[in-house]
Image (cartoon, helix red, strand yellow):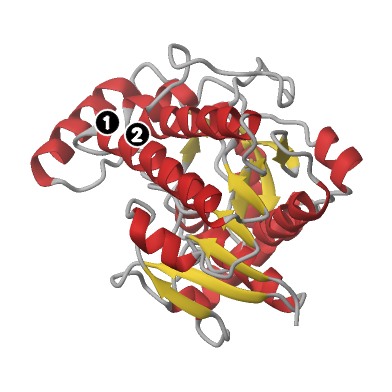
Amino acid sequence: MGDKVLVTGASGFVGSAIARALGRRGDEVRVLMRTTSPRTNIEGEEFEIAEGDMLDRHSMIEAMDGVRHVFHVAADYRIWARDPQEIVRNNLEGTRVVMDAARATGVERIVYTSSVAALKPGHGSAVDETSRHSEQTVIGAYKKSKLVAERLVERMAGEGLPAVIVSPSTPIGPRDVKPTPTGRIIVQAANGGMPAFVDTGLNLVHVDDVAQGHILALDKGRIGENYILGGEDVRLREMLAAICALVDRKAPRVRLPRAPLYPLAWCSEAVARYTGNEPMLTVDALNMSKYHMFFSSKKAREELGFTARPYGEAIADAVAWFRQAGYIK
């Protein structure tokens, strides 16, 4: 039997992949879940379930009883909310509670899941962990929430908290149940719902490679350091073409200018504030699409031994899972 580890956010896409990877290597996995959290992504796994919430210190301390290592993956992952500050509060305070509980219970090592959302993208070239956003330059509530939470973990690591930070780029692959915003793009493209595109780019990485990167960070990462866990830089047009090729659809050829899309985004957000439903398009999403979200994982490769499979394999696995699960018609 391996180490006893706690994973927060195991009902989600990345968290469940990490929990499964830890289970495969023989660790004794405990997962933190709210009573209302779906169990779909951990079905068939022999995980111990600790019911609680990352915002509740008492339940976090109970969940860490006897635990050697903690993977804090849980986050309020919403691109839009009626009250954007709610996203910031949840992710900052949730991280504070988890880190305080880990310190109080004497956890030996923590791996904190940040995001490349907290990094400042370049203009068409890949950036590394030194390209840092500020609260003034970051776009959107979610990105700000990951930025301030990451800074908190950095400060606490400087004060002796045994935490390593990892920053996944854009994970794709199986078991994206919700799905994530990128997963929705894959589903929409595969179903013929994306006839056009804007000129943007992103870094795609298989979710199972991200999970292995977390374990490498636990075993080899330096306390207080941040490691990008990314795959390949891909333009959106190329990504859509790869998806369409897998489902025998024609790839979109029409490139949309951004300016005419802003009135649609404003209207979508206005309707969302009234209905409470997530808008089809947001102003923050359009602003972010001006940048090519390209990132370098050189540090993780050299220090951790991290590797990632080609993005085409990740897309193929994602499409196959979405098709099997009934998302793709």
Residue shown at 68%/55% (left/top)?
A: 108
Q: In the rendering, at what x and y percent does residue 129 appear? A: 71, 26
Number of numbered discs visible in the structure rendering: 2
In the rendered image, residue 263, in percent from the top left (x then y), is placed at 25, 22
Q: If the image is split into quadrants, where does the N terminus sit?
A: bottom right
Splitting the image into 4 quarters, where does residue 155 fall? top right
User: Label 1 is placed on what type of residue?
Assistant: Gln
- Residue 274: name its quadrant: top left
**Relative height, residue 189 to residue 15 (above, below):** above
Where 268 sits versus 276, above or below?
above
Q: CA distance from mark 2 to mark 1?
A: 5 Å
Of 158 and 299, nearer the camera is 158
Q: Secondary structure at mark 2?
A: helix
Q: Is residue 190 visible?
A: yes
User: Which quadrant does the C terminus fall into?
Assistant: bottom left
| Image point (43%, 67%), residue name | 62
Q: Are marks 2 and 1 in contact (CB under 8 Å)?
A: yes
Left or right placement of residue 159 versus residue 48 in this view: right
Identify the residue under disc 2: 88
Task: Please tell me the numbered disc located at residue 270.
Answer: none
Residue 183 placed where, x, y %? 50, 54
Q: Is residue 153 left or right of residue 224?
A: left
Specify the amino acid type for callout 2. Answer: Val
In the drawing, what numbered circle is on residue 85? 1
Q: Nearer the viewer, residue 74 or 266?
A: 74
Q: Is residue 247 visible?
A: no
**Corner quadrant of residue 199:** top right
